[in-house]
Image: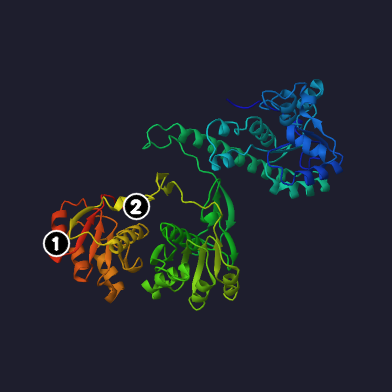
């Protein structure tokens, strides 16, 4: 259906719109009183609702209650306040049209030129762990209606949905009103705000209605706000920007404490490092180059400084590749770790925190980027990847919290079950290989990687690469493979290098040949029945 027909000759210039009347109804009260003071100072009538009106009135400013305009009291525990023609006609009247202006006069309704509305904290309520009716009560109805009405009528109304826009609004009031360009930009932000809000509500209902845990949402909306324009993308000819997702708790929400501006590749590597280090329960460090680990380790037993110990052990895996690497630590970075890094060129360090003394050491490395994770950082439950014309959605690949108990059920197909230290090494290698691009082979000793083979188009080459990088350290190490060995040639490379135990998913049609090779060498082999591809 097309919109109403208008006589273009009746349209009048509405570039700068002076503000005579403002409607304010906000859940987030940040900056409210300063804004209200600026509005009142211009002699503008303030119309407001509920707690917003009480806060403004408490600051000594005159307020007209919405109920005075509508002639209808707020009802149903505040669910109905602004859903009334006396409000929405004032929001939607196009005063470029003489007919609209006349209808307002006939109805004795005054228009609004400024609307400040933000919505109930639905996303924050869900993030807090609330459920059921507590979440439903945070679904705003009147707020989105006012936002959308005002944004549609941007030719006449400035709609503000975020405290971040208040300085711009105040400057406009002092200058005499809002410009058409400003109102259009504010409208774009407003529609994005309500779209993200509706998407969050839809996602919550979709997740809550899934009876089959294997099911996924029928529809998916992902909303993100541009946080930072980057110098370039993966390569210098590609444009790039960082966006933050509403409700996100990851690398995009980290605070940069020092260093050069983060690049696209820095963010990719930092996220990969984070994924790797936080798979570990003990103090752990991961060193990443080109989204692949070149060293992973947990602290040595009884280490005086566990996170510094973990870093040194990770670095020893491949010191050459660690040059210019990105590091993630799953504990606060200590002075000792910072001192160990003084002479090692590093691009980024990401951690939950940094000791003040460590920050002092790092200040001498002015280009080093330090990222501090948000306090509520947590691993994502779902993975999303864009493909041509659409996207792929899957459960995030996670290890069970009780993986030690899970490992007791691994199928022993060759050799003897190792002692506790040997099982600890196998579990470490198994967890580490999830962070390595497929085909992935990890050699580990003492819960530190000694050789990593990644990203090869056949598993034999990954085995050779891991052994080559380990050198003499391969002897006595344990090995993990992210997927089954299709032939016995891959395991044979590991066996010839002196690997003492292998953990792999199993499931190949030639498992018998692989098992036979391990038994002939007298080497322990476990099947986990679980694959960990990472493409």
Pointer 2 local density, CA inside 10 Å: few below 14, some 14–19, many at least 20: few
Q: Are marks 2 and 1 in contact (CB under 8 Å)?
A: no
The answer to whether one can see residue 396 in this image is yes
Residue at which label 1 appears: 519
79 displayed left or right of 454:
right
403 displayed left or right of 374:
left
Quarter residue 495 falls in = bottom left
Q: Element type at marker 2? A: helix
Please provide percent x and percent y for residue 155. Answer: 72, 37
Against 338, is 94 above or below? above
Query: Residue shown at 50%/36% (left/top)?
Result: 204
Which mark lies nearer to you, 2 or 1?
Answer: 2
Q: Front-most of 46 and 297?
A: 297
Q: Quadrant of the C terminus?
A: bottom left
Please provide percent x and percent y for residue 390. Answer: 42, 44
The answer to whether one can see residue 12 in this image is no
Q: Quadrant of the N terminus?
A: top right
Residue at which label 2 appears: 403
N-terminal label among 2 and 1: 2
Please provide percent x and percent y for residue 145. Answer: 65, 31
């Amino acid at each position: 259906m097309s919109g109403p027909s208008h006589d273009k000759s009746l349209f009048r210039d509405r570039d700068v719109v002076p503000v005579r009347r403002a409607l304010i109804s906000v859940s987030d009260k940040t900056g409210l009183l300063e804004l209200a003071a600026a509005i009142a100072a211009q002699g503008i009538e303030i119309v407001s609702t509920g707690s917003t009106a009480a806060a403004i009135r408490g600051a000594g400013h005159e307020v007209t209650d919405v109920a005075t305009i509508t002639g209808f009291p707020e009802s149903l525990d505040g669910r109905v306040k602004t859903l009334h023609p006396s409000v929405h006609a004032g929001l939607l009247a196009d005063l470029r049209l003489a007919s609209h202006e006349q209808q307002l006069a006939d109805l004795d309704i005054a228009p609004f030129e400024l609307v400040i509305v933000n919505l109930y904290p639905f996303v924050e309520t869900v993030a807090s762990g609330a459920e059921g009716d507590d979440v439903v009560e945070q679904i705003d109805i009147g707020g989105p209606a006012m936002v959308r009405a005002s944004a549609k009528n941007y030719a006449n109304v400035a709609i503000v949905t975020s405290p971040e826009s208040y300085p711009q609004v105040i400057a406009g009031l002092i200058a005499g009103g809002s410009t058409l360009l400003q109102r259009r930009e504010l409208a774009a932000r407003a529609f994005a705000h309500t779209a993200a809000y509706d998407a969050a509500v839809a996602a919550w209902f979709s997740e809550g209605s899934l009876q089959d845990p294997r099911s996924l949402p029928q529809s998916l909306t992902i909303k993100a706000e541009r946080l930072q324009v980057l110098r370039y993308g993966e390569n210098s000819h590609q444009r790039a920007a960082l966006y933050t997702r509403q409700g996100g708790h990851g690398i995009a929400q980290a605070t940069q404490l020092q260093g050069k501006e983060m690049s696209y590749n820095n963010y990719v590597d930092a996220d990969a490092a984070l994924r790797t280090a936080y798979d570990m329960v003990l103090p752990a460090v991961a060193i990443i180059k080109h989204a692949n680990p070149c060293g992973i380790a947990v602290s040595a037993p009884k280490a005086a400084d566990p996170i510094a110990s973990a870093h040194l052990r990770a670095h020893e895996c491949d010191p050459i590749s660690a040059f210019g690497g990105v590091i993630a630590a799953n504990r606060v970075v200590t002075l000792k770790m910072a001192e160990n890094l003084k002479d090692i060129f590093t691009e980024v360090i990401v951690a939950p925190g940094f000791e003040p003394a460590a920050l002092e050491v790092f200040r001498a490395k002015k280009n080093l980027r330090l990222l501090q994770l948000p306090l509520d950082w947590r691993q994502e439950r779902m993975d999303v990847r864009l493909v041509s014309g659409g996207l792929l959605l899957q459960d995030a690949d996670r290890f069970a919290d009780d993986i030690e108990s899970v490992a007791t059920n691994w199928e022993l197909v060759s050799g003897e079950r190792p002692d506790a230290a040997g099982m600890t090494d196998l579990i470490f290698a198994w967890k580490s290989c999830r962070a390595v691009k497929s085909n992935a082979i990890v050699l580990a000793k003492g819960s530190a990687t000694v050789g990593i083979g990644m990203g090869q188009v056949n598993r034999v080459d990954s085995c050779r690469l891991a052994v080559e990088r380990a050198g003499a350290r391969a002897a006595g190490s344990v090995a993990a493979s992210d997927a089954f060995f299709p032939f016995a040639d891959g395991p044979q490379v590991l066996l010839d290098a002196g690997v003492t135990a292998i953990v792999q998913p199993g499931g190949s049609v030639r498992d018998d040949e692989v098992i036979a090779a391990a038994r002939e060498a007298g080497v322990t082999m476990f099947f986990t029945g679980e694959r960990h591809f990472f493409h």
